[in-house]
Amino acid sequence: MAVMQTKSFTGKVAFVTGGSRGIGAGIVRRLARDGAAGASHGEGPATNQNKAAIKR
C-alpha cells in the first residue's frame, strides 16, 4: 500500500468551487488541515462548516 506524503499549504490561498459537499468538501477540509487559507463556494448546510475549517 502506498503512503501519501502531506504537502504543506501554509501561506497558500485556495478557492474551491463546489466545496459544500462530496469531493469538493473533502478537498476543502484537506487543504484547510494542511494550512491553506482561502474560500469555498457552494450551497447547502455543509458550506458553513467548510468556511469554519478554512478560517482555522
Image (spheres, rainbow, N blue to C red):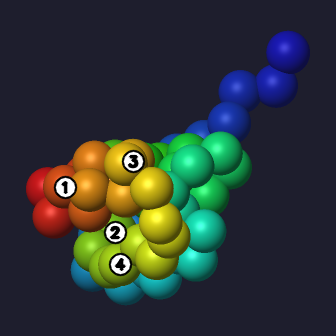
Name the residue that disc number 4 marks: 39
Name the N-terminal-most of marks 4 and 1: 4
Report the mark closest to the observer, 3 or 2.
Answer: 3
Circle 1 crowding by C-alpha within 10 Å: few under 14, some 14–19, many from 20: few
Secondary element type, mark 1? helix
Q: Examine the image and state in which quarter residue 27 appears.
A: bottom right
Q: CA distance from mark 4 to mark 1?
A: 10 Å
Task: Decide which of tag 4 and tag 3 comes sooner along the chain.
Answer: 4
Q: Secondary structure at mark 3?
A: helix
Q: Amino acid at mark 1?
A: Ala
- The residue tagged with tag 2: helix, strand or loop? loop
Residue position for label 1: 52
The relative height of residue 27 versus residue 14 in the rendered view (above or below) is: above
**Label number found at residue 36:** 2
Residue at the spot 58% in from the left edge and 77% down from the top edge:
17
Q: Position of residue 9 (x, y in %)?
A: 40, 68
**Whole-number angstrom distance, CA of label 2 to CA of label 1:** 13 Å
4 and 2 marks in contact (CB < 8 Å): no
